[in-house]
Amino acid sequence: QKILIRGFTSLQNSTDPLVIMDGINLGRSGLNFVNMADIENIDILKDASGAAIYGSDASGGVIIITTKKGKLGRFQTDADASYGSSFYKDPKLNANVSFSGGTEKMNSFASLGYTKSDGNYTVGGAYWQKVLARVNFDFTPNKYLKVGFNLNPRFENWVNAGQGDLMPVMRTE
């Protein structure tokens, strides 16, 4: 699907928006790297002055995503699943599970999401599946030092009936 923030700004270049997640540039098609269940906040920069710090990559606008983090004083587990069908009768399964928690000196968040969609363009056996995982950890031993890491691996697989795997992909940001 196409997202258009600033209109058609170029006849030759892409008008897709730049995606920034937790300060990491995911590129112009970066929404595919984001588990929607992990989103805490989304900001849209559509004017040139707000997007200027990202340079010419932001000519189509910028989507800034802030993801969930562990909260102080509580451990929490969330899970959800959905199954449905669209207009084209291609069944789709979504499942997500997340764990979060924190203390005054550290917090952590981990999630795992799975999506599978049966293909509507061929007959029998075509599908697309995606697994997104995310782990973030922040440790603040004192007021002068904060250490953390984020890990966001993704696995995608497209299978066309009778053709086998079209494109297995593994990417870690």
Image: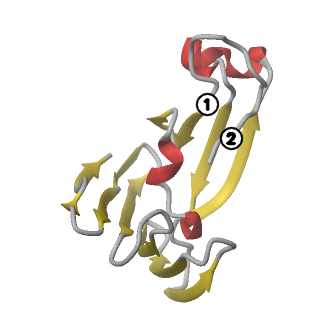
Name the residue located 50 percent from the left edge and 82 percent from the top edge: 93
Decide which of 34, 103 is in the foreground and name it. Answer: 34
Image location (x, y in percent) of residue 7: 78, 25
Residue hosting label 1: 16
Is disc 1 surrounded by few (<14), some (14 to 19) or many (20+) residues within 10 Å? many
Mark 1 lies on a secondary structure that is loop
Name the residue located 47 percent from the left edge and 74 percent from the top edge: 103
Residue hosting label 2: 3
Look at label 1 and name its amino acid: Asp
Question: On residue 54, which mark appears?
Answer: none
Say above or below: 76 vs 9: below
Label 2–label 1 contact, CB within 8 A: yes
Name the residue located 56 percent from the left edge and 87 percent from the top edge: 80
Q: CA distance from mark 2 to mark 1?
A: 6 Å
2 sits to left or right of 164 = right
Is disc 2 surrounded by few (<14), some (14 to 19) or many (20+) residues within 10 Å? few
Image location (x, y in percent) of residue 18: 57, 31
Say above or below: 123 vs 142: below
Say above or below: 53 vs 45: above
Decide which of 26, 141 is in the foreground and name it. Answer: 26
Mark 2 lies on a secondary structure that is loop
Q: Give the image quarter of residue 2.
A: top right
Look at label 2 and name its amino acid: Ile
Earlier-in-chain disc, 2 versus 1: 2
Query: Hey, which residue is sitting farthest left in the picture?
Result: 164
